[in-house]
Amino acid sequence: MCHMTCARCVGATLIPLAVSATLTNILLFFPGANKMDNNIHLSEEVWYFGGILGSGVLMILPAVSLLNSKTIDCSAIYEQEDCGKKLKMLNTMMFLGTGIVGALYAFAISVVAIIRGPKCLVGNNTWEYPFHDGNYLKDIGLWNNCKEPIHIVPWNLSFFSIQLIISGIQISLCGTYVAKIYKLFLLPSCGTIKNPFRACCFQRF
């Protein structure tokens, strides 16, 4: 029998990652664990919903597809019987592509947010982005430029970093699995056996 490598294992891993990314994005709406008096003072990147949409909702599609993946008989690869199973694999690969796009979106948003820094009160009732080109990452003393919200700099930096890591892991998992499915498609088409010694090594747990 020919199986897809650890489909349910990867799918089960993507689910908690998607939930974690969503929670991370939600927490960014409450800097310093406090509710903002005016949401217009939140950093723009928070409203792009990188964790909720990119690494969250769009990642559910490939996760569910992998969790519901069926065993793929080798006859779908080497014989004409049930060749439609390859189309199911192609469908899974398309969902994985959607997940990769979503994770890349969240990854890009996180990078921009970390480099740009948070929007905060700098004095005289002025809310702006006081940092430039990630200079605050090298000089912690600059963090004092942000008067409010309290601890906004470490809060944003921590959660956008978590979002960055989560999306990076999602990209790796989905990308690796797409490559494995693509490799399976390189096997002889249905009805032919060009290389009888080529092992069917994809397994699902």
Image (spheres, grey):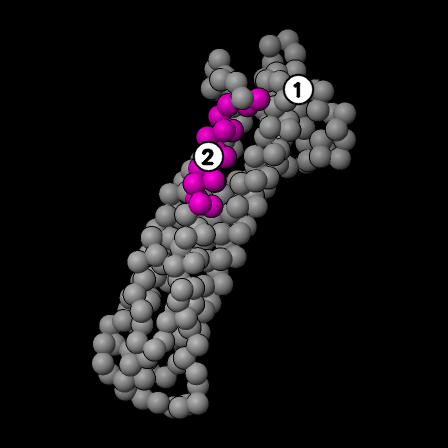
Callouts 2 and 1 close, C-beta under 8 Å = no
Q: Is residue 134 above or below residue 30?
A: below
Span of residues in magenta: 16-32
Residue at screen point 38% across, 53% down? 63
Q: CA distance from mark 2 to mark 1?
A: 25 Å
Residue 187: numbered disc = none
Mark 1: amino acid: Cys
Residue at screen point 57% across, 22% down? 32
Residue at screen point 47% across, 48% down? 103
Q: Secondary structure at mark 2?
A: helix
- Going by the image, does 135 lie left or right of 65? right
State the image quarter where residue 136 is shown. top right
List x then y, in percent, for residue 76.
29, 78
For label 1, the crowd category at 10 Å Cα-Cα, with few meaning under 14, some 14 to 19 and many 20 or more, is many
The verdict on residue 8 being magenta is no
Mark 2: amino acid: Leu
List x then y, in percent, for residue 118.
60, 27
Q: What secondary structure do most residues of the magenta stretch adopt?
A: helix
Q: Is residue 149 above or below residue 95?
A: above
The verdict on residue 19 being magenta is yes
Q: Foreground: 25 or 6?
A: 6
Regarding residue 112, the answer to whether it shows in the image is no
List x then y, in percent, for residue 106.
49, 43
Regarding residue 18, the answer to whether it shows in the image is yes
Closer to the eye: label 2 or 1? 2
Residue behind mark 1: 146
Residue behind mark 2: 23
- Going by the image, does 76 lie left or right of 37? left
